[in-house]
Amino acid sequence: MRTRERIDPSQLDIKDNVVSINRVTKVVKGGKNLSFSALVVVGDGHGVVGFGVGKAKEVPSAIKKGIEAAKKNLIRVPLAGTTIPHAVLGNYCAGSVLLKPAPDGTGIIAGAAVRAVVEAAGITNIMTKSLGSANPHNVVRATVAGLDMLKDPTVVARMRGKELAELTGATA
Protein backbone atom coordinates (compact mmCIF):
# COMPACT_ATOMS: atom_id res chain seq x y z
CA MET A 1 0.00 0.00 0.00
CA ARG A 2 1.40 3.35 -0.99
CA THR A 3 1.58 6.24 1.43
CA ARG A 4 -1.15 8.79 0.96
CA GLU A 5 -0.69 12.51 0.86
CA ARG A 6 -2.58 14.41 3.55
CA ILE A 7 -5.31 16.53 1.95
CA ASP A 8 -6.56 19.47 4.00
CA PRO A 9 -10.40 19.56 3.74
CA SER A 10 -10.61 23.16 5.02
CA GLN A 11 -9.02 24.45 1.79
CA LEU A 12 -11.51 22.61 -0.48
CA ASP A 13 -15.16 23.25 -1.33
CA ILE A 14 -16.42 19.86 -0.16
CA LYS A 15 -19.93 18.55 -0.81
CA ASP A 16 -21.39 15.56 1.01
CA ASN A 17 -23.74 12.82 -0.15
CA VAL A 18 -25.47 10.28 2.12
CA VAL A 19 -25.31 6.83 0.50
CA SER A 20 -27.18 4.77 3.08
CA ILE A 21 -28.68 4.99 6.55
CA ASN A 22 -29.18 1.81 8.60
CA ARG A 23 -31.15 1.34 11.78
CA VAL A 24 -28.99 -0.68 14.14
CA THR A 25 -30.30 -2.44 17.24
CA LYS A 26 -28.12 -3.77 20.04
CA VAL A 27 -29.84 -6.23 22.38
CA VAL A 28 -28.79 -5.73 25.99
CA LYS A 29 -29.99 -7.05 29.35
CA GLY A 30 -32.51 -4.24 29.81
CA GLY A 31 -33.95 -4.40 26.28
CA LYS A 32 -32.88 -3.01 22.91
CA ASN A 33 -30.66 -0.02 22.21
CA LEU A 34 -31.59 1.68 18.94
CA SER A 35 -29.05 3.71 16.95
CA PHE A 36 -28.40 4.77 13.35
CA SER A 37 -25.44 4.19 11.06
CA ALA A 38 -24.79 6.53 8.11
CA LEU A 39 -22.47 5.92 5.15
CA VAL A 40 -21.40 9.29 3.70
CA VAL A 41 -19.29 10.19 0.64
CA VAL A 42 -17.63 13.62 0.34
CA GLY A 43 -15.76 15.22 -2.55
CA ASP A 44 -14.86 18.52 -4.17
CA GLY A 45 -15.83 17.55 -7.73
CA HIS A 46 -12.25 18.10 -8.96
CA GLY A 47 -10.53 14.79 -8.18
CA VAL A 48 -10.72 14.59 -4.38
CA VAL A 49 -13.04 12.05 -2.73
CA GLY A 50 -13.46 10.26 0.60
CA PHE A 51 -16.00 8.23 2.56
CA GLY A 52 -16.88 7.76 6.20
CA VAL A 53 -19.24 5.92 8.53
CA GLY A 54 -20.92 7.52 11.53
CA LYS A 55 -23.08 6.00 14.27
CA ALA A 56 -25.30 7.87 16.71
CA LYS A 57 -28.69 7.79 18.46
CA GLU A 58 -30.17 10.26 15.93
CA VAL A 59 -29.83 10.36 12.13
CA PRO A 60 -28.46 13.95 11.82
CA SER A 61 -25.75 13.22 14.39
CA ALA A 62 -24.79 10.02 12.55
CA ILE A 63 -24.54 11.93 9.25
CA LYS A 64 -22.42 14.65 10.87
CA LYS A 65 -20.05 12.03 12.32
CA GLY A 66 -19.85 10.31 8.93
CA ILE A 67 -18.91 13.59 7.22
CA GLU A 68 -16.16 14.23 9.77
CA ALA A 69 -14.81 10.67 9.29
CA ALA A 70 -14.92 11.08 5.50
CA LYS A 71 -12.91 14.32 5.64
CA LYS A 72 -10.14 12.44 7.46
CA ASN A 73 -9.49 9.93 4.67
CA LEU A 74 -9.58 11.92 1.43
CA ILE A 75 -7.77 10.64 -1.66
CA ARG A 76 -6.76 12.41 -4.88
CA VAL A 77 -7.97 10.75 -8.10
CA PRO A 78 -6.04 11.33 -11.36
CA LEU A 79 -8.48 12.43 -14.06
CA ALA A 80 -8.11 12.32 -17.85
CA GLY A 81 -10.44 15.15 -18.80
CA THR A 82 -13.88 14.07 -17.62
CA THR A 83 -13.07 10.38 -17.17
CA ILE A 84 -10.41 8.11 -15.64
CA PRO A 85 -7.08 7.40 -17.37
CA HIS A 86 -7.43 3.59 -17.55
CA ALA A 87 -9.66 0.67 -16.53
CA VAL A 88 -9.27 -0.70 -13.01
CA LEU A 89 -10.87 -3.34 -10.77
CA GLY A 90 -11.33 -2.32 -7.13
CA ASN A 91 -11.84 -4.97 -4.45
CA TYR A 92 -12.96 -4.90 -0.86
CA CYS A 93 -14.11 -8.10 0.92
CA ALA A 94 -16.79 -9.68 -1.29
CA GLY A 95 -17.39 -6.47 -3.27
CA SER A 96 -15.66 -5.79 -6.58
CA VAL A 97 -16.21 -2.80 -8.85
CA LEU A 98 -14.98 -2.53 -12.43
CA LEU A 99 -14.32 1.06 -13.53
CA LYS A 100 -13.77 1.78 -17.25
CA PRO A 101 -13.09 5.11 -18.98
CA ALA A 102 -15.78 6.33 -21.36
CA PRO A 103 -15.85 8.92 -24.18
CA ASP A 104 -17.49 12.33 -23.75
CA GLY A 105 -21.29 12.21 -23.77
CA THR A 106 -21.55 8.76 -22.16
CA GLY A 107 -22.43 10.01 -18.69
CA ILE A 108 -22.18 8.00 -15.50
CA ILE A 109 -23.28 4.40 -15.98
CA ALA A 110 -23.28 3.11 -12.41
CA GLY A 111 -25.37 1.93 -9.50
CA ALA A 112 -26.34 4.22 -6.63
CA ALA A 113 -23.33 3.61 -4.35
CA VAL A 114 -20.73 3.80 -7.14
CA ARG A 115 -22.49 6.84 -8.66
CA ALA A 116 -22.21 8.73 -5.37
CA VAL A 117 -18.45 8.16 -5.23
CA VAL A 118 -17.66 9.02 -8.87
CA GLU A 119 -19.89 12.13 -8.83
CA ALA A 120 -18.17 13.35 -5.67
CA ALA A 121 -14.79 12.83 -7.39
CA GLY A 122 -15.91 14.92 -10.37
CA ILE A 123 -15.95 12.14 -12.96
CA THR A 124 -18.73 12.74 -15.53
CA ASN A 125 -18.05 9.99 -18.13
CA ILE A 126 -17.47 6.46 -16.82
CA MET A 127 -18.79 2.92 -17.21
CA THR A 128 -18.90 0.73 -14.12
CA LYS A 129 -20.04 -2.73 -13.14
CA SER A 130 -20.51 -3.89 -9.58
CA LEU A 131 -19.45 -7.51 -9.23
CA GLY A 132 -20.13 -9.61 -6.16
CA SER A 133 -21.57 -7.99 -3.05
CA ALA A 134 -24.37 -5.42 -3.37
CA ASN A 135 -23.82 -4.17 0.20
CA PRO A 136 -23.35 -0.37 -0.08
CA HIS A 137 -20.48 -0.37 2.44
CA ASN A 138 -18.47 -2.95 0.45
CA VAL A 139 -19.32 -1.31 -2.91
CA VAL A 140 -18.22 2.17 -1.75
CA ARG A 141 -14.99 0.81 -0.26
CA ALA A 142 -14.26 -1.20 -3.43
CA THR A 143 -14.90 1.89 -5.60
CA VAL A 144 -12.59 4.06 -3.50
CA ALA A 145 -9.95 1.28 -3.57
CA GLY A 146 -10.21 1.18 -7.37
CA LEU A 147 -9.92 4.97 -7.68
CA ASP A 148 -6.91 4.87 -5.34
CA MET A 149 -5.19 2.34 -7.64
CA LEU A 150 -5.40 4.68 -10.66
CA LYS A 151 -2.07 5.97 -11.94
CA ASP A 152 -1.47 9.33 -13.59
CA PRO A 153 -0.31 8.77 -17.21
CA THR A 154 2.37 11.50 -17.03
CA VAL A 155 3.95 9.89 -13.94
CA VAL A 156 3.93 6.42 -15.58
CA ALA A 157 5.53 7.85 -18.75
CA ARG A 158 8.23 9.57 -16.70
CA MET A 159 8.98 6.35 -14.76
CA ARG A 160 9.32 4.38 -18.00
CA GLY A 161 11.46 7.07 -19.61
CA LYS A 162 9.05 7.64 -22.49
CA GLU A 163 6.99 10.48 -23.87
CA LEU A 164 3.30 10.65 -22.96
CA ALA A 165 2.24 10.40 -26.64
CA GLU A 166 4.43 7.31 -27.02
CA LEU A 167 2.75 5.69 -24.01
CA THR A 168 -0.83 6.44 -25.01
CA GLY A 169 -0.32 5.41 -28.62
CA ALA A 170 -1.16 8.85 -30.02
CA THR A 171 0.49 9.75 -33.30
CA ALA A 172 2.30 13.07 -33.51
Image (cartoon, rainbow, N blue to C red):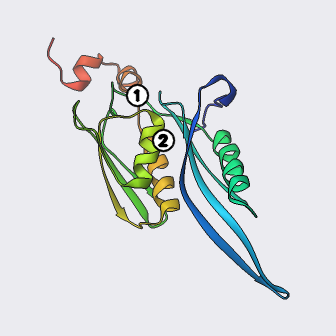
At a point 60% along the width and 66% down the height, the residue shown is 22
Q: Is the residue marked by circle 2 packed among few (<14), some (14-19), or many (20+) residues within 10 Å?
A: some
Residue 151 in picture, x, y percent from top left: 41, 33
For label 2, the residue is: 148
Residue 10 in picture, x, y percent from top left: 69, 27
Residue 132 in picture, x, y percent from top left: 37, 67
- Quadrant showing the C terminus: top left
Q: Is residue 32 above or below residue 86?
A: below
Q: Amino acid at mark 2?
A: Asp
Can the viewer see residue 156 in this picture?
Answer: yes
- Quadrant showing the N terminus: top right
Which is more toward the observer, 167 or 45?
45
From this viewpoint, which residue is outermost toward the right?
30
Q: Element under label 2?
A: helix
Residue 38 in picture, x, y percent from top left: 62, 58
Using the image, tell me which numbered label, if any, was put on residue 152. Answer: 1
Q: Amino acid at mark 1?
A: Asp
Which is more toward the observer, 132 or 113?
113
Q: Is residue 24 left or right of residue 113?
A: right
From this viewpoint, which residue is outermost toward the top?
172
Report the Cα–Cα distance between label 1 and label 2.
11 Å
